[in-house]
Amino acid sequence: MKPSEKLNKALNQQVGHEFAASQQYVAIAAYFDGEALPGLAGFFYRQAEEEREHAMKLVKYLVDSGGELEIPAVPAPRHGLGSAVEAVQLAVESEQRVTGQIYSLVELARQDGDLIAERFLDWFVHEQFEEMTTMGGLLQVVERAGEGQLLRVEEYLERQPHPEAEGEEG
Ligand code: FEO
């Protein structure tokens, strides 16, 4: 089913939001990489890949449903991060914002009675729950460790299962 004009526009905007999230995570990963914290850097490089996959899922949906793909310009990510807490806080805020955007998309699909779009978006709703949980947990761990004990955060990340190792989809 072809998405309504309004939903189509919002889906295109979401493609941009997901690419923007991906670039923000590259910037966060690079910050940690520069601080010689490979665990945190790797975690955010992987998140960046996942966000790109989210954008591509939306691209594919627009193409398959007969919608019009128009990828918007993406705003520059924030650089110049001053601490691990600031970097992870930025990620938490990004996930909260994306969750709100996904909820708005679900609302639009409901208003249109577009059940196919609504079911498609279910995946994103679950994914946001997971990402908000993971990111919120990481912020707690980083805050608890403090800037002087970030190697403990690295150990914590090493103990976390990597989704790709379990064969889960990004
Ligand atoms: Fe695709 Fe984490 O938002």
Image (cartoon, rainbow, N blue to C red):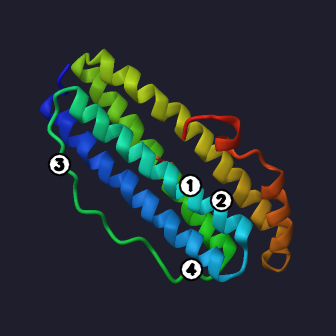
> Quadrant of the image for the N terminus?
top left
Q: Secondary structure at mark 1?
A: helix
Give the Cα distance between marks 1 and 4. 18 Å
The residue positioned 61% from the left and 83% from the top of the image is 82
Estimate how packed mark 1 is, as few (under 14), some (14 to 19) or many (20 or more) residues with alpha carbons within 10 Å: many
Q: Secondary structure at mark 4?
A: loop
Estimate how packed mark 2 is, as few (under 14), some (14 to 19) or many (20 or more) residues with alpha carbons within 10 Å: some
Label located before the other in sequence (1 or 4): 1
- Residue carrying label 4: 81
List x then y, in percent, for residue 134: 67, 48
Q: Secondary structure at mark 3?
A: loop
Identify the amino acid type marked 1. Gln
List x then y, in percent, for residue 136: 67, 52
Above or below, 29 relative to 83: above
- Residue carrying label 1: 47
Give the Cα distance between marks 2 and 4. 17 Å
Above or below, 43 relative to 151: above
Q: Are marks 1 and 3 in contact (CB under 8 Å)?
A: no
Identify the amino acid type marked 4. Leu
Compare residues 84 and 44 and report the one nearer the observer.
44
List x then y, in percent, for residue 104: 35, 37
- Residue carrying label 3: 70
Q: Secondary structure at mark 2?
A: helix
Identify the amino acid type marked 2. Phe
User: Of the residues tagged 3 and 4, which is closer to the observer?
Assistant: 3
Label located before the other in sequence (2 or 4): 2
Compare residues 143 and 161 and report the one nearer the observer.
161
In this rendering, position of residue 90 left or right of residue 63: right
> Quadrant of the image for the C terminus?
top right
Q: Which mark is residue 43?
A: 2
